[in-house]
Image (cartoon, coloured by chain):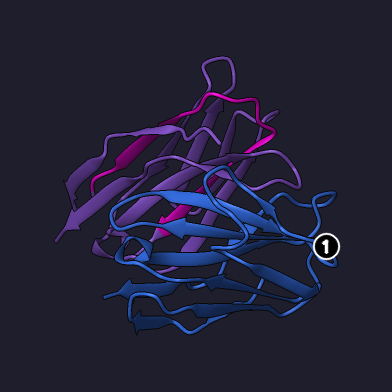
């Protein structure tokens, strides 16, 4: 299984500021995804982080609000920009190693964000 | 993405009893995965079942999949207090992100 770490594990931020969340994987992976989990809700996909190209965003999520970087096959960042209290959520990255050999997706421990 | 539906939304049982959670979905899939989440933390992968499989076991877990009915079930046998968590089903296609159900909150009391 994958070892995935996220930083920070939690943060409390002021309205209007930005936070960058890091996701580090212990080995190279083909697919990386970012999800949001609002309080008491299920997970919603924000975007697919593509290595070497722009992320692919889901409906309702835009690059200006959630810029994503993926400089290599083991690392990605998600920035939550110009935050408002509605952005208070758990943000999770997930990875799929190799879709040709396994479809299992593993999740990081999540970043719990509270916006005041 | 379309989310699946899980039922029940909440389940409360006593230790030693079996817990059954159901999941229905709408889209075509080639796999369905079950996850556990403790107190809003990260998701722990429990089991993956492929669309050409009907049943799978892992320890105290048994998962079934009926693609004709677009439904799956997760059975936890001989439950323990440590099984208290939220359980999510997620459907997917290889190389794509998962579509998550709304989850079932399981409470196992001693």
The residue nearer to you, when weighing B7 against A112, is A112
Q: Which residues are magenta?
A: B17-36
Residue named by callout 1: A53
Numbered disc 1: secondary structure: loop
**Residue B15 visible at all:** no
- At 52% from the left edge and 45% from the top edge, which residue is drawn? A60
Residue B26 shown left or right of residue B8 in the figure? right
Give the position of the N terminus of chain B as an image quadrant: top right
Residue B99 shown left or right of residue A52 in the figure? left
User: Callout 1: few (<14), some (14-19), or many (20+) C-alpha neighbours within 10 Å?
Assistant: few
Q: Pinpoint residue A18: horizontal percent, then vertical percent.
A: 48, 78
Q: Main secondary structure of the magenta part?
A: strand
Q: Height in image: A61 above or below A63?
A: above
Q: Height in image: B57 above or below B79?
A: above
Q: Pinpoint residue B73: horizontal percent, then vertical percent.
A: 44, 33
Chain letter for blue, please: A
**Quarter-of-image position of residue A105:** bottom right
Q: Pinpoint residue B85: horizontal percent, then vertical percent.
A: 31, 58
Q: Is residue B35 magenta?
A: yes
**Residue A89 visible at all:** yes
Give the position of the C terminus of chain B as an image quadrant: bottom left
**Quarter-of-image position of residue B101:** top left
- At 52% from the left edge and 32% from the top edge, which residue is drawn? B2
Residue A23 shown left or right of residue B23 in the figure? right
Q: Colour of chain B?
A: purple
Q: Pinpoint residue A109: horizontal percent, then vertical percent.
A: 49, 73
Q: Is residue B10 magenta?
A: no
Residue, far top: B68
The residue nearer to you, when weighing A73 against A84, is A84
């Amino acid at each position: 299984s994958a070892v995935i770490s996220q930083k920070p594990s939690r943060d409390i931020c002021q309205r209007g500021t930005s936070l960058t969340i890091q996701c580090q994987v212990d080995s190279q992976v083909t697919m990386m995804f970012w999800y949001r989990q609002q309080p008491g809700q299920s997970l919603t996909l924000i975007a697919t982080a593509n290595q070497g190209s722009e992320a692919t965003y889901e409906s309702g999520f835009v690059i200006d609000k959630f810029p994503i970087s993926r400089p290599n096959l083991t690392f990605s960042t998600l920035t939550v920009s110009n935050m408002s209290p509605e952005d208070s959520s758990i943000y999770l990255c997930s990875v799929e190693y190799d879709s040709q050999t396994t479809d299992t997706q593993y999740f990081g421990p999540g970043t719990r964000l509270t916006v005041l | 993405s379309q989310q699946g539906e899980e039922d029940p939304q909440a389940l409360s049982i006593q230790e030693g009893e079996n817990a059954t959670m159901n999941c229905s979905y709408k889209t075509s899939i080639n796999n369905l995965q079950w996850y556990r989440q403790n107190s809003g933390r990260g998701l722990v992968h429990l089991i993956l079942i492929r669309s050409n499989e009907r049943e799978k076991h892992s320890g105290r877990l048994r998962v079934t999949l009926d693609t004709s009915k677009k439904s799956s079930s997760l059975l936890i046998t001989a439950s323990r207090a440590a099984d208290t968590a939220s359980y999510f089903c997620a459907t997917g296609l290889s190389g794509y992100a998962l579509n998550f159900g709304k989850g079932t909150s399981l409470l196992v009391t001693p």
